Image (cartoon, helix red, strand yellow):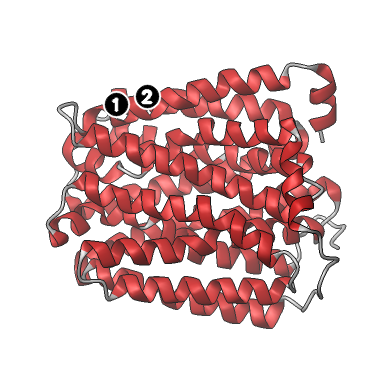
Amino acid sequence: MSTGSNLPLQVWILTLSAFAIGTAEFVIAGLLTQVAEDLGITEGQAGQLITAYAMAIVIGGPILTLWLARFDKRNVLLGLMGLFIAGNIMSAFAGDYATLLISRIIAGLTQGPFYGIGAVVATRLVSRDMEGRAVGQMFAGLTLANVLGVPGGAWVGNNFGWNTTFLIVAVLGVVASLAILSAIPRQGREEVTSIRDQIGVFADRNLLASLTFTVLAWTGFMGFYGYIAPVAEQVAGFPRADVTWVLVIVGLGLVLGNTLGGRTADANLRLSLIGWPIAMIASLVVVGITAPSKWPFVVAAFLFGVMSFANVPAMQMRVMKFGTKAPELAATANISAYNIANALGGIIGAAVVDSTLGATAIPFAAAVVPILGVLFIITQERKPRLGAQHKA
């Protein structure tokens, strides 16, 4: 366990892996219009590729984790990466909507267990006062995916076709697998906890409340980010080729937000849980107001990136604090919660972009459900005993 100020190499390896998986999850945001045009479907139908991936995580993640928790964690991570690689190769050679949809489901099955088990490994590699930063660092792979992977994938798609993008994602998976194999030692089998005992962790109402909050507060992220390309093109007036650098700027905001969120989660979890979602809602409203103007829209979208990903470490830490009896399952359940939110955001965005309201209304629609999340978490965090317990 690292007790100094520096995070161990293994955490950075998990970051690399999260980067590969995060690129696969979010790259569709930069390819949405290309896929729709190539396959002859609407943008709303293309957006359902987001929903399908998310629902694979929601349903498959906890089930796989229940089974995988008893095995050596390095071997589990390697096996999950193998399935991830296979799913993205299938995406690369998909010639129709149905095949692409199935391939996204296959790739999505791996994400929940990988992030859930990986987050537990990350916290065990550091001292207690650095757990938020360790989790934040692992999830920095997601933010880097949005800075480099998603814009890079959009650029590749524009120049070489979206199929090539998924082939490169599969190669990223191979690189991550080799890094895991070389840098993360075998950890041995842990004491087997029965499936019944693992499921019993959900009897804790505080854990269920944490998962509910993740769903409500996070819906706003994919509600806007998943449809940022139509907003940038149709409302702000950017040429398609310029969407790539817009995504880079938003991605930089995600990196900054993830770093800030990790530190504030360690300093004051309660304040982070309430403050950052409010800031994200405000940023979505500003995005909606400024969308018709190019440069104000870019600035607002950057701020949205900061405010949205600052939520991630605090949400994950609250779940893990109440899920200590089955930490892998609890952490994976929160990944499922994120992706219920992603699916819901995808559904909301699809309905709005295909309606008479169009892309202009997407940021405002994305802000609605997170408002409920803020109201809900205030009711859960207002009791002094909870606030004292959560403050790091």
Residue 349 drawn at (x, y percent) = 31, 36
Tag of residue 286: 2
Residue located 38% across and 53% down the image: 52
Residue 386 quadrant: top right
Relative placement, left or right, of 277 versus 55 is right
Q: Amino acid at mark 1?
A: Thr
Q: Amino acid at mark 2?
A: Val
Residue located 75% across and 31% down the image: 268
Q: Is residue 4 above or below residue 217?
A: below
Residue located 34% across and 74% down the image: 90
Residue 6 drawn at (x, y percent) = 77, 59
What secondary structure is found at the residue carrying circle 1? helix
Residue ranking furthest to the front: 196
Residue 170 drawn at (x, y percent) = 42, 75
Q: Are marks 2 and 1 in contact (CB under 8 Å)?
A: yes
Q: Write down the residue under mark 1.
A: 290
Q: Is residue 218 above or below residue 47?
A: above
Relative placement, left or right, of 340 versus 156 is right
Residue located 41% across and 38% down the image: 344
Residue 87 quadrant: bottom left
